Amino acid sequence: MRFLRRFVWVTIGVLMLTGLSAVSIASSHKLVLTGSSTIAPLAVELGRRFESLHPGMRVDVQTGGSARGINDTRKGIADIGMVSRAMKADEQDLQAVTIALDGIGIIVHASNPVAALTRQQIADIFTGKITNWHEVGGKDARITVVNKAEGRSTLELFLAYFQLKNSEIRPHIVIGDNQQGIKTVSGNPHAIGYVSIGAAEYDAQRGVPLKLLPLDSVAASVVNLRNGDYPLSRPLNLVTRMTPTALAKRFIDFARSEQAYDLVEMQYFIPVSVD
Amino acid sequence: MANKQIVDTGKPNHLLRDRAIQLLIYLVVLCVSGIFLWILLDLIRGGSALLSWDFLISMPRDTGRAGGIGSILVSTLLVLSIALLVALPIGWATAVLLAEFIPAMSSFGSWVRYSLQVLAGVPSIVFGLFGYAFFSIYLGMGFSILSGGLTLACMLLPILVSTAEAGLRAVPESYRLSAAALGMSRAATLFHVLLPVAVPAWAAGLLLGIGRAAAETAALMFTSGYVDRMPESLLDSGRVLALHIFDLSMNVPGGDAPAHASALVLILLLLMINLVAMHLTHLWQRRKLNTE
């Protein structure tokens, strides 16, 4: 029994330690960002440079999706939320600032002879009305439809642009992040999907068997995205409560400044010009 | 000669069937180790070029595409240590209680066992959300290595308890009776008779637990978090290796090579922990059994 009692004491000790340490958390020189996994890698790099410019500051970045960014900012768990889409009508209680743009491109395997699809053809493919590539001028092969998972900003944007509902889409594969989409389509000669243009361009240039299809006869490229010709793009937002803390405001200003352009471009996004 | 007789006495199929089944079993075993080797070779092919001492100790740069995994390794080991430090005493004490101190069929015992079984079947993302709501927010630990470690500890409990309890139950009843006949206390019996016999089973459970903890992504995304800086205290957020691999391969264009290298490190780390733990178990068991 003595041995058991010792274990009980150890347990109690550990619990008390954790309780004690929980008291000293909040600090004024720390900035917490949570939200979209698309923005997170960029935010980490922004944070690193911000820290080196302002010694003593700390920027902590957490992921979990745009919805979490909104939630955590509302609850005050995060100082800044990362949201990779335009704000919705019921999110007007938050202040959003766009720090970069990201385009969404339709991708197929590089060996696919189809060079372009009309808006109607894409909608028909994703809703299962067209099921074979030879109906749109390709080889005689069944089309594999790759869709994004519920809750992803890319999905919402895609649906809005083609005026579809997610329940109408007949996907064969449902994916999460960008790189997963690229890996799925580059591994399947008959697949079609949609991912972030920057990421797709990066991989296509490095020999991944991948092809970006033009949309409404505008080529899906970072260049066309930057000059505003490409129609399907989304803003990458940093959101705060209506009155952001001085530190949060400074970070957002930094993220929009020219000091951060090269970081934005290194993640294959388009920096927005400061107006 | 004996074999030949069986064949000759009108049952020619037996030998053939035995051989076939033997072959089948070998094939299955080959498949199992083949899968492991395939994964390992794939990782070595994709990641060995990056792997170096420098990769192990330098900080990640450019979202992990450049630099190393120094801070990530430290966070991983810290989260793992906290999880084990908390889960081992609780888990093993529970196992001892269930196996040695209360009747096997008691309603309390079966209630505890039942809740552990339910806990074992809970997907890790649910632990993650629980840890986020309870440790990070309700107890105010924020996104920290501490809250990640405690969340993992909750996840490890079912594995640790069930393996340790099974290990104790496998010790023959005669050992306990002999110890009682010699007038040994129950605690002394436990430490000097039962544990030395059961320790391989406990070590197996421990290794299973470490493996599961080191591979955990979902439960830690919401608790110990995503920050890839070198942690300064247990209240800092720190990215673990599994989450780093996930992020590199799913979120970062051009992150495949470092992802492979990090995965290779994770496997080597587990392999090393396994070897050390097995060696320690062996040493401890021999010392206990020889001197007493």
Image (spheres, helix red, strand yellow):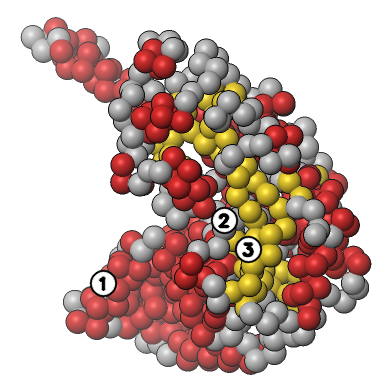
Label 2: few (<14), some (14–19) or many (≥20) C-alpha neighbours in 10 Å = many
Label 1: few (<14), some (14–19) or many (≥20) C-alpha neighbours in 10 Å = few
Where's residue B281, x and y in %? 56, 60
Label 1, label 2: how far apart the Cα atoms are? 45 Å
Front residue of A209/A93: it is: A93
What type is the residue that disc 1 sits on?
A: Tyr
Where's residue A107, x and y in %? 54, 29
Q: Residue at x 36, y 63 (%)?
A: B122
Q: Are marks 1 and 2 in contact (CB under 8 Å)?
A: no
| Label placed on residue A91 | none
Q: Which residue is mark 3?
A: A82
What type is the residue that disc 2 sits on?
A: Arg
What type is the residue that disc 3 sits on?
A: Met
Q: Give above or below for B96 relative to A225.
A: below
Q: Which residue is mark 2?
A: A85
Label 3, label 1: how far apart the Cα atoms are? 41 Å
Q: Give above or below for A41 relative to B184.
A: above
Same chain for labels 1 and 2? Say yes or no.
Answer: no
Q: Quadrant of the N terminus of chain B?
A: top left
| Label placed on residue B114 | 1
Image quadrant where residue B239 sits = bottom right
In terms of secondary structure, where does tag 3 sit? strand
